[in-house]
Image (cartoon, coloured by chain):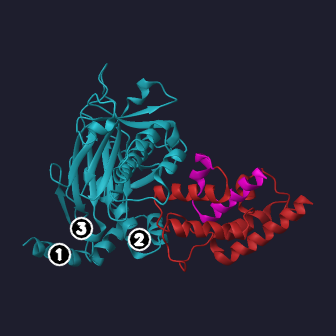
Amino acid sequence: MASVTASSVSISSLSCSLKQNQVFNLKKVSFSVSRKSFPSLRLQPAHRRFHVACAAKPETVEKVCEIVRKQLALPADSAVTGESTFLSLGADSLDTVEIVMGLEEEFGISVEEESAQSITTVQEAADMIDKLVEKKA
Amino acid sequence: MRGSYLRMKLHCLDRKFFHSSPSLAPIQLPSPMETHLWYVIPSEVKSKALLNQFLDILSPCEKENVFQMRGEEPRKRALLARALVRTTIARYQINSQVSPRSLRFRKNIHGKPELEWQFSDHWLSPPLHFNISHTSSLVACGVTVNSQIGIDVEEKNRTIKHNILSFARRYFSKDEVQFLADILDPEIQRQEFVKLWTLKEAYVKALGKGFSGAPFKTFTIRYNGGGGVNPLENLNCEAQEIVVDTSDEPIELTNNWQFELLELAGSHYAAICMENNFSSEGKRTVPVKLTVWKTIPFLEEECVSGTDAVKTISGSK
């Protein structure tokens, strides 16, 4: 049951992110297709990135975008999507640390330095959040 | 007169653009335990022709990164940062083999950018280390020889969205939180926070292991000096030493790192952290010579050491 649920979540998030930035996600799509387990989509922790890439709910991504916009004082209509890197949006290291802190507060999670360092995009942050929230539950 | 001199130089550059890249004056390498600091003020760089010359010396990857930035100003800053690094480093090793464009960079295993040396039989240069930092209004590059270096610059009036003590409790060490909590004036507390942030960043960048290699909570940076128990008594005293203590490493090892904290261009705090390979028995620090230039690559430079543009706040003596 869990794997079926997981597969429907991941498919919808893949198609959701395809709309945003086709070039970037092409890599993700082809990677998942090449995996033998794709049809049943049992999310193995084997490749952490793959698992993480399929986990984020659209609402989480949206919430992260909101927090990032607020931290970087970006106008509400500025283009912030899953693929946006904090750096390209104008965040320096202090901003990034504040963003992580903002995410911790919003979602009630705790992010270790190692994980924080590997987050460079909105999508990566959302993926990590969903994973941590899931672990907490 | 200065205005017209600049205009004349720009005019020459505009013509030269179509013929060859502009020449760079060579500069002598820093000696061991000497730091060179170069900075650019982006708002002073207006010439499109000059910006194109900068673009011209970047690698394809660097160009891509520049264009990924959103907005003209962030793009300009990213461009200036790479141009500053390439032109500056090229000046230290002028010979027929080196040009700003020919320099190769790579990242160490933790992701810290470093120079990739191309040794030839005839040319052996001492290892040159560099580190960049920038804010929305200043781009800086520190250079040393034989010594790891980390720099961080922040605008003096930088504010954070979170409450300072909440932020410090989350990310800084207990002693640092105490140091900030003891400051009653919110403005001074904010300033000290920003200075502490730059020092911590500079240290982590000097170590080159990334944020997770030296989590901010695991080390304390403090001012040591003047004998006062309360460091605030000696805050603006140049005799103050800045030291780092880690909970993990024995005290001897952390003596390897020396700090300088400056007020730069009247608008920024700049922290420089470098490795100290020369301390003798009993003496924690060796004097560090710092030379600072304000520059626009290819165009002009001005040594600003000893002027109002460079004010030492604390450091090694």
* First in residue order: circle 1 vs circle 3: 1
Q: Main secondary structure of the magenta part?
A: helix
Q: Residues within 10 Å of mark 2 (few under 14, many from 20)?
A: some
Residue B184 x %, y %: 37, 47
Residue B3 x %, y %: 12, 74
> Could you tell whether B6 is left or right of B36 in the image?
left
Q: Residues within 10 Å of mark 1 (few under 14, many from 20)?
A: few
Q: Colour of chain B?
A: cyan
> Could you tell whether B148 is left or right of A96 in the image?
left
| Disc ID at residue B22 | 3
Residue B28 x %, y %: 21, 47
Residues rendered magenta in the picture? A111-137
> Could you tell whether A16 is left or right of B5 in the image?
right
* Pointer 1 residue: B12
Q: What is the secondary structure assignment of the residue under circle 3? A: loop
Residue A71 x %, y %: 51, 65
Q: Colour of chain A?
A: red
Residue at image location 72% in from the left, 64% down from the top? A56
* Pointer 2 residue: B75
Query: Same chain, marks 1 and 3?
Result: yes
